Amino acid sequence: MELWLFNHSTNEQQTVHTDADPVVVGRGDECHIQLKSPFISRKHVRIVRKGNQFFAESLCRGATRIANRDLEYGKSAKLDFGDEIQLGQFSLTLVRPQEEGDLATASKAEQQQRNQQKLTAFEQTIHTRLLERLNLRVTANLDKTDAAYIEQMMWQLAAILDEHIEELDDAIISHTVFSYLHRLVLAEVVRQSQGRMQTDFKLVDDPRINPAHDQAIAQVVADAVDAMPLLFDPISVGEDLAIAEEILEDQFEELLGKLPRELAHYIVRRIVTKDLSDIMLGLGPLQDLLEMANVTEIMVVGPNRIYVEKNGVIQRTTRHFFSDEILQSVIERILTPIGRRVDHANPMVDARLADGSRVNVIIPPLSLVGPCLTIRKFSWIPFTMDDLVERGSISPHAARFLQGCIHGRLNTIISGGTGSGKTTLLNTLCSFASHTERIVSIEESAELQLPQPHVVSLEARPANVEGSGAFTIRDLLRNALRMRPDRIIVGEVRGPEALDMLQAMNTGHDGSLSTLHANTPVDAIKRLETLVLMAVDMPVRAIREQIASAAHLVVQVTRFASGQRRVTRIAEVLGIDRDSDDVQLEDIFVLRDADQKSLRHTGYIPTFTQKLIDKGYLSIETFL
């Protein structure tokens, strides 16, 4: 039996061979596969062969997952080739026998990882040599934004690279060429799909550019993309990028054979120069991730672990920072231009990049694993309701129903977990508001992109270095009431501003919308109660009456394990239940689980239906 063993804490992978049957995995000395970790039980899981099938049995009460599904203590589950057994910080994957060809794939994956590690070590050596030379030749008081400093740095980098380029073997060169072509192919797919890159970062380039070589590389990339069966649709760019990555990997050996060795060495110089200039002047290994349209979130956990979310699924990358200091300098480059700071006195901060991406930073002593950086990327092409319907996020009937409710100026709360798509749905629903209305949007970090001509966008501001000058969501909400809004859109309610939002909904600002973190519509109502209590000490009954009279709809969105985000429940707020004194909700559309094809109407007709039908916003066919 052969398995791949991956240690997520060290980012190391190895192949494990064993002739035992069954195979016991755990930290005990008697186990066939020993995993030394306090998160692993003495005997954690057993892998058993029964004929041509394999089964995994949990031997402990510790967490064990098979193919992203929990395995209970004493239970067993069928184990297919390629399924991951997740236990502690380790993953085990059963490998097919050699005749099926998967061993070659395993060997290829291990080789790619080793090549990446060697390339990173090579870049770190060049970076160290560069710092040594600059420390000797540049005065200490020279500003690093000075053009002379930058020019000298790039020439020094080119010279050091020339001295060490021959140290790289053919395998690393091949790996580096693939990485470069991969970046260029994805960038070209995005360019043809969306008309421009997603970010506006300007970087200093290699001073020894060879136009002829660049033209030859551009032609290779153009030919590769032209041969791919892609749609080049701005909305489906994620699918195009996934296809492009797969085809490029299959065709790379053929492409490599067409590149002269001189051009391959030129590519190595270009990618190493870019990586190091990103570290010295840009955002380091995050730079390219920000430019990838299929990456929606970037998560840095200390200098050695960088995760991304692609197509709704979190994946670990092979990238890392050379040190905590470099990661800290990248964080400062993000925060300084927008007037934010992070230090031991203020170790946590929220910010926004120039392109609208949301940034959260937390550093020691609050973080025990080093500086942590999270970037929620901004999508400059918003989704339409048709896009959500085509992706299966909402059913056509439910979409028409919500559209009618927005036209009918019902107050709506969108509830969901982190990353479930609340802001995306909010942005989509806001687009249905009338173009004759005055809309005031209030956000912690501005993300909404509304098409209406009369929109006033307000953004909260944290305190300055002296601890003053802060303007909260609640401050902006109170001010918005004096701005004669027709609708008030609050990006997210998570504090005492919940009281002001409810009062706004109750004082003539019908059609207002907001989002809230909660797992169900019932939880959303209870959380609203809690948030109002943060603002004022008043009887819970009075709070519930405020909620019942202010909110009309609660729309629940959920992010499933597959990464898909779907509307799972639409409920009407009916009023106060006479028996329990709770806010009463009635489901209108429900999605029971991820296997259900689409939202289904429960049979309940909302109390406001006739009113919206009379105004022409809804039809009874919406519920059929």
Image (cartoon, rainbow, N blue to C red):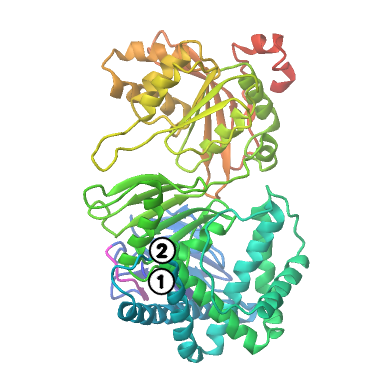
Residue tagged 1:
149
- Residue designated by label 2: 145
Residue at (54%, 80%) from the top-left corner?
A: 269
Q: Find residue 572 and report its horizontal and vertical position in percent.
A: 54, 19
Label 1 sits on a secondary structure element that is helix
Q: Can residue 73 be seen here?
A: no
- The span picked out in magenta is 32-38
The vertical placement of 443 against 509, above or below, is: below
Which of the two residues, 478 or 94, is positioned nearer the viewer here? 478
Vertically, is 515 above or below 137?
above
Q: Amino acid at mark 2?
A: Thr
User: Amino acid type of disc 1?
Assistant: Tyr
Compared to residue 35, the image places residue 336 above or below, namely above
Distance of mark 1 from mark 2, alpha carbons? 7 Å
Left of 332 or right of it: where is 425? right
**Between 549 and 384, which is closer to the camera in this rendering?**
384
Q: Position of residue 332 (x, y in %)?
A: 35, 56
Q: Say whether residue 463 is left or right of residue 385.
A: left
Callout 1–callout 2 Cβ contact below 8 Å = yes
Disc 2 on helix, strand or loop?
loop
Q: Is residue 231 magenta?
A: no
Q: Quadrant of the C terminus?
A: top right
Image location (x, y in percent) of residue 27:
30, 70
- Local packing at callout 2 (Cα closer than 10 Å; few below 14, some 14-19, many 20+) is few
CA neighbours of label 1 inside 10 A, class few (<14), some (14 to 19), many (20+): some
Q: Nearer the viewer, residue 87 or 6?
A: 6
